[in-house]
Image: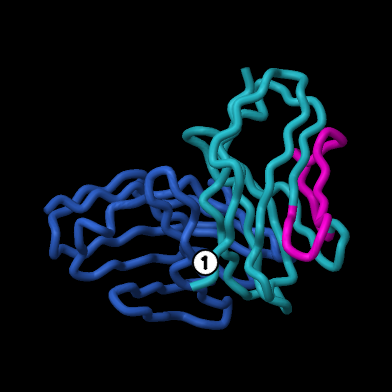
Amino acid sequence: EPEVTQTPSHQVTQMGQEVILRCVPISNHLYFYWYRQILGQKVEFLVSFYNNEISEKSEIFDDQFSVERPDGSNFTLKIRSTKLEDSAMYFCASSEQGARGQPQHFGDGTRLSIL
Amino acid sequence: SQQGEEDPQALSIQEGENATMNCSYKTSINNLQWYRQNSGRGLVHLILIRSNEREKHSGRLRVTLDTSKKSSSLLITASRAADTASYFCATEVLTEKLVFGKGTKLTVNP
């Protein structure tokens, strides 16, 4: 069964450094998402992306965050200057076209640790 | 309560028993989805129920939705040790964004 893959599985970064989290969504999916889960807390929506642009973003997704689909397969989340509170599991998800009412398929996540 | 709150927070049962988890939400929804998360893994989609549906089945899973009470339940019948995981409800309101609850941690003892 096709799946969403994320790399790396664990990223350790010094505070203030830039980090790029990578995702390969399911190949025929057109909607892409990033969520994060701080340890012990809820999974929180960050951003959705469709047709090469952001379709919705949360309050968490401030100017330090950006997303990009640099080619036909990858979907990346960049944090420009990381803060301690960015430490979390980051999940990428994708869904088929006509996404409302479609299940979202999640990757196994990248654990980001900011030191 | 916040959108998508599961109850109970933790549930421990014996293999073969049924497990019931509940979810309450505050606003009108397009649909409600249940996801499972094994420790250290991503979220796996289990079942989606639309706002105009009242009940849905998938294998050993049964989901109900009561829009008048703004609540949903997930029943896992004849549980197995492999069902041990955290279970989350997620609501889709106006857009594709999913709003998750804190989850129910289910432990099925062999």
Q: Residues within 10 Å of mark 1 (few under 14, many from 20)?
A: many
Q: Amino acid at mark 1?
A: Gln
- Magenta highlight on residue A57: yes
Q: Is residue A77 above or below residue B97?
A: above
Identify the element where label 1 is drawn.
strand
**Please, which colouring scheme is shown?**
by chain
Question: Where on the picture, by quarter, is residue A80?
Answer: top right
Q: Which residues are magenta?
A: A55-75
Q: Position of residue B32 (x, y in %)?
A: 54, 67
Task: Tell me if A92 is positioned left or right of A109 in this view.
Answer: right
Pointer 1 residue: B33
Q: Is residue A86 above or below residue B35?
A: above
Task: Tell me if B63 is positioned left or right of A76 in this view.
Answer: left
Q: Which of the two residues, A70 or B82, is positioned nearer the viewer here?
A: A70
Q: Which chain is blue?
A: B
Residue B109 visible to the viewer: yes
Quadrant of image for the C terminus of chain A: top right
Residue A100 visible to the viewer: no
Q: Residue at x 48, y 73 (%)?
A: A1
Q: Position of residue A58 (x, y in %)?
A: 76, 46
- Magenta highlight on residue B94: no
Provide the chain ID for the residue under circle 1.
Answer: B
Q: Position of residue B109 (x, y in %)?
A: 15, 50
According to the rendering, which colour does chain A have? cyan
Q: Is residue A41 above or below residue B32?
A: above
